[in-house]
Amino acid sequence: MTGPDWDEWDEEEYAECLAGERRRFAWVMRRYGGLTPAQAESAAVKRYPYQARGVPFRGLIFHHQAWTWAMREIYGHFYGREHPDLVLPSAEYWALN
């Protein structure tokens, strides 16, 4: 299986993707996790730390959407079993872009 070559991203593309995923992760943590804006932002930066060019697997975190990472943080790895209604992102989430 082949995927994106994370090291080939230019810095602007990487930074844009990182900022977007942080924004979406923080939104889910506020909306579904009950975190304050400051707590959600801190959690997003922790989940999506900046990785310098050349770091092995830079950007691999992007293989799942922020929705998935946030739901796993809130409800656990198998959140879909107990919350099947949350397996797919909400319309509000999709509207964040």
Image: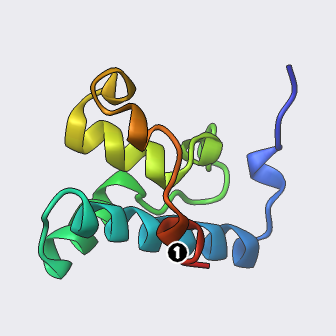
Tell me: residue 22, above or below residue 37: above
The quarter of the image holding the C terminus is bottom right
- In this image, 80 relative to 32: left or right? right
Residue 57 in view, yes or no: yes
Q: Residue at x 74, y 48 (%)?
A: 6
Instruction: Please provide percent x and percent y for residue 78.
Output: 34, 22
Instruction: Please provide percent x and percent y for residue 59.
Output: 62, 49
Query: What residue sits right under mark 1 in the picture?
Result: 19
Q: Identity of the amino acid at label 1?
A: Ala
Count up the numbered dots: 1
Tell me: residue 66, above or below residue 79: below
- In this image, 36 relative to 72: left or right? left
The quarter of the image holding the N terminus is top right
Instruction: Please provide percent x and percent y for residue 92.
Output: 48, 71
Instruction: Please provide percent x and percent y for residue 86.
Output: 40, 43
Q: Secondary structure at mark 1?
A: helix
Model colouring: rainbow
Q: Residue at x 39, y 62 (%)?
A: 25
Residue 58 in view, yes or no: no
Q: Residue at x 35, y 52 (%)?
A: 47
Tell me: residue 49, above or below residue 58: below
Q: Residues within 10 Å of mark 1 (few under 14, many from 20)?
A: some
- In this image, 5 relative to 12: left or right? right
Residue 51 vs residue 68, the one in the foreground? 68
Q: Residue at x 83, y 35 (%)?
A: 3
Residue 90 vs residue 67, the one in the foreground? 90
